[in-house]
Image (spheres, helix red, strand yellow):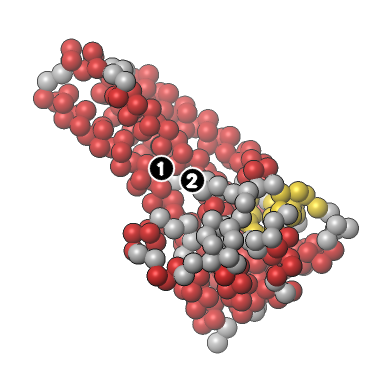
């Protein structure tokens, strides 16, 4: 989190130096803090709304409710709000700023395709995200990555349309030219670096949630089998975007392709670790 905030402040300072305007640094910091607060307190509501999730009670789906309730008690967590997404593609995610304000959403397709042990494995995985505060970390990280992209985009567009060019001409010189070149390079590379860090964090937290979820159910094979079924489904989710894809248990934008055949460069931009690797580690836990 410190690394992301440092990037935002660094970009703000760099761009304010190019334009000789301290106000840009102030705006960048205020924008980052404001968006982080919005993401912290309302990010879960936005995600649930855009995914088409509807909240349920015990009478709506007693089996699902009992699974969530029993695993929640075992994990020592507060009961989260439970949502169903009416889509045939199997998947699930957790969101919220902390365990007291957590929500778990699962697709109707997952409830139809997965058996009870597999469903328990998926729910345990999502509850592990809740218990490990991954839901807070990934929400704020996503917000800060978007801020870095916005600040960089504003700077690059301002250079294209000539904003601040007069100041550069008046206060130019070798140092000003070097600073301008560095700022342009930073504006291009910063969003890419920030996104790679976000994706790396996301992949690492998936491994941790797999392990903790397997320990919670004491049956790693349930989650391993569920991951295989979910990843092999041939159609992606309809109501999902790249901004929220990292929240799901498997990549909701994939369509059953073999991840092991993807080039290394593509894996760097993947929101999740390869399913085969996750399944292998889970089955090793069960030996």
Residue depicted at 42% across the width and 33% down the height:
150
Residue depicted at 36% across the width and 39% down the height:
7
Q: Quadrant of residue 283?
A: bottom right
**Residue at image mark 1:** 4
Q: Which mark is residue 282?
A: none
Asked whether, in this view, residue 268 is left or right of residue 20, the answer is right
Q: Quadrant of residue 91?
A: bottom right
Q: Which mark is residue 141?
A: 2
Where the N terminus falls, by quadrant?
A: top left
Tell me: residue 154, above or below residue 237: above
**Image position, residue 10 (x, y; %):** 33, 34
Mark 1 burial class by Cα count in 10 Å: few <14, some 14-19, many 20+: many
**Image position, residue 48 (x, y; %):** 67, 46
Is residue 215 among what the camera can see? no
Tell me: residue 30, above or below residue 222: above
Labelled pair 2, 1 in contact (Cβ < 8 Å): yes
Task: State which tag comes first along the sequence, 2 or 1.
Answer: 1
Mark 2 burial class by Cα count in 10 Å: few <14, some 14-19, many 20+: many
Tell me: residue 193, above or below residue 63: above
Residue depicted at 65% across the width and 61% down the height:
89
Decide which of 136, 19 is in the foreground and name it. 19
Q: CA distance from mark 2 to mark 1?
A: 8 Å
Decide which of 199, 216 is in the foreground and name it. 199
**Image position, residue 277 (x, y; %):** 46, 73
């Amino acid at each position: 989190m410190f690394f992301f905030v440092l990037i935002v402040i660094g970009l703000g300072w760099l761009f304010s130096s190019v334009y000789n305007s301290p106000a840009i640094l102030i705006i960048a910091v205020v924008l980052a803090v404001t968006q982080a607060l919005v993401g912290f307190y309302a990010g879960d509501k936005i995600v649930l709304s855009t995914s088409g999730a509807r909240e349920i009670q015990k009478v709506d789906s007693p089996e699902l409710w009992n699974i969530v309730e029993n695993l929640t008690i075992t994990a020592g967590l507060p009961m989260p709000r439970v949502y169903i997404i009416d889509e045939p593609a199997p998947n699930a995610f957790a969101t919220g700023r902390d365990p007291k304000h957590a929500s778990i959403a699962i697709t109707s397709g997952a409830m139809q395709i997965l058996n009870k042990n597999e469903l328990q494995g998926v729910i345990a995985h999502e509850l592990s995200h809740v218990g490990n505060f991954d839901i807070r970390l990934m929400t704020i990280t996503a917000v800060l990555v978007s801020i870095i992209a916005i600040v960089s985009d504003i700077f690059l567009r301002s250079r294209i349309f000539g904003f601040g060019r007069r100041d550069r001409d008046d206060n130019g010189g070798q140092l000003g030219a070097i600073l301008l070149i560095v700022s342009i390079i930073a504006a291009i590379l910063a969003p890419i670096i920030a996104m790679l860090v976000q994706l790396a964090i996301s992949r690492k937290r998936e491994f941790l949630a797999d392990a903790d979820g397997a320990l919670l159910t004491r049956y790693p094979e349930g989650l391993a089998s569920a991951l295989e079924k979910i990843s092999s489904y041939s159609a992606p989710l309809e109501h999902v975007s790249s901004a929220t894809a990292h929240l799901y248990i498997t990549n909701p934008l994939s369509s059953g392709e073999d991840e092991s055949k993807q080039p290394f460069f593509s894996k760097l931009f993947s929101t999740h670790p390869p399913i085969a690797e996750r399944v292998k580690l889970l089955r090793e836990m069960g030996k």
